[in-house]
């Protein structure tokens, strides 16, 4: 298990875990998601290969369309 802080809230997940797997676990697949990991933006092109570690601090923003 790893502990992550996501938008200030502590959550536990099974390890190993990539950013892409986290997006699926949070049911955000198919949505436009911007992620910052420990103060650094994680480019979308690297979501599948970016491994998350215990104690990582994430900020996630989900784009919402509307009119």
Image (cartoon, grey):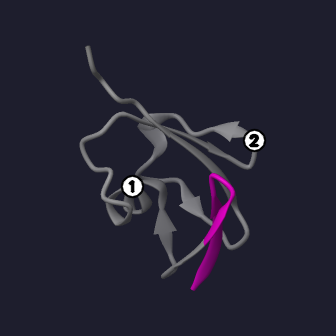
Residue 6 sits in quarter: bottom right
The structure residue drawn at horizontal position 50% and vertical position 76%, both measured from the top left corner, is 16
- The image position of residue 44, as x and y in percent, is 44, 36
Tag 2 secondary structure:
loop
The structure residue drawn at horizontal position 73% and vertical position 69%, both measured from the top left corner, is 55
- The image position of residue 62, as x and y in percent, is 43, 37
Above or below, comparing residue 47 to residue 17 in the picture: above
| 2 in magenta | yes
Q: Which mark is residue 60?
A: none
Residue 30 sits in quarter: top left
Q: Of 62 and 66, which appears nearest the observer?
A: 66
Give the residue number, with chain letter if any, for mark 2: 39
| 67 in magenta | no
Give the residue number, with chain letter if any, for mark 1: 23
4 vs 46, left or right, is: right
20 vs 3, left or right, is: left
The structure residue drawn at horizontal position 69% and vertical position 57%, both measured from the top left corner, is 8
**1 or 2: tag closer to the N-terminus:** 1
- Label 2 environment density (alpha carbons within 10 Å; few <14, some 14–19, many ≥20): few
Q: Residue furthest top?
A: 67
The structure residue drawn at horizontal position 47% and vertical position 61%, both measured from the top left corner, is 18
- Label 1 environment density (alpha carbons within 10 Å; few <14, some 14–19, many ≥20): some
Q: Main secondary structure of the magenta part?
A: strand
Q: Residue furthest bottom?
A: 1
1 vs 25, left or right, is: right
**Highlighted magenta segment, given as a residue range:** 1-10
Above or below, comparing residue 41 to residue 16 in the picture: above
């Amino acid at each position: 298990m790893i502990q992550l802080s996501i938008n200030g809230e502590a959550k536990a997940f099974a390890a190993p875990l990539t950013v892409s797997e986290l997006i699926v676990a949070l049911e955000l697949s198919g949505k436009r998601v911007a992620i910052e990991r420990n103060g650094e933006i994680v480019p979308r092109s690297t979501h599948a290969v970016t491994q998350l570690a215990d104690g990582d601090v994430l900020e996630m923003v989900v784009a919402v369309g509307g009119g």
